[in-house]
Image: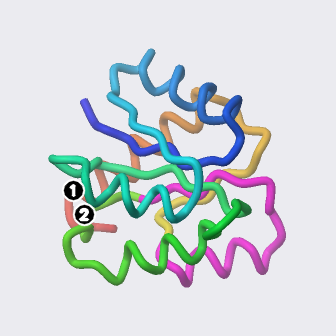
Amino acid sequence: MATVLVVDDTPSIRFLIRTNLELAGHDVVEAFDGLDSLEMLSVTDPPPDAVTMDMMMPRMDGLAAVQQIRSDPRWDRLAIVMVTTQGQHYDVTAADRAGVDAYVTKPFEPDALVATIERTIAARQAGRG
């Protein structure tokens, strides 16, 4: 199974995502915001297979964090799923340009989120990301 870094500044959302991923057999690490996520990626060995990233967070938002992740070749195979309340067309377009693999708006259906994460991991590992 995969390791997923769950990034969200709301503890209850991190808990919800963590619980559903763990029930599906995945390992989970957590980060509070974009800066924290970059630190966790640097110290987690081996690196996670995927990241769920909120968009609106303190210190560093999700888009800035995704741009930094995508600029680092160590994380080429990292699947990124944006999980956010920001559902306008320009938000989705900005996330796509930053390099996210999938976009899920809150509130989400937990099983659908897990399936999206698993699908993006498989695509990245197959070199289709």
Looking at the image, which residue is at 39% across and 37% down? 29
Start-end of magenta stretch: 80-99
Report the residue marked by disc 2.
77
- From mark 2 to mark 1, how far is it between C-alphas? 6 Å
Q: Is residue 105 left or right of residue 25?
A: right
Residue 105 on image: x %, y %? 73, 51
Amino acid identity at mark 2 = Arg
The location of residue 15, given as percent across then percent down, is 60, 26
Q: Is residue 58 left or right of residue 67?
A: right
Between residue 50 and residue 35, name the one nearer to us. 35
Verify CB contact (< 8 Å) between mark 2 and mark 1: yes
75 w.r.t. 79: above or below:
below
Residue 39: quarter of image:
bottom left
At 70% across and 62% down in the image, what residue appears? 58
SS at circle 1: helix
Q: Residues within 10 Å of mark 2 (few under 14, many from 20)?
A: many
Residue at 48% from the left image edge and 36% from the top image edge: 115
Q: Is residue 58 above or below residue 16?
A: below
In what element is the residue under mark 2?
Answer: loop
Measured as percent of width and height from the top left, residue 85 is found at 80, 54
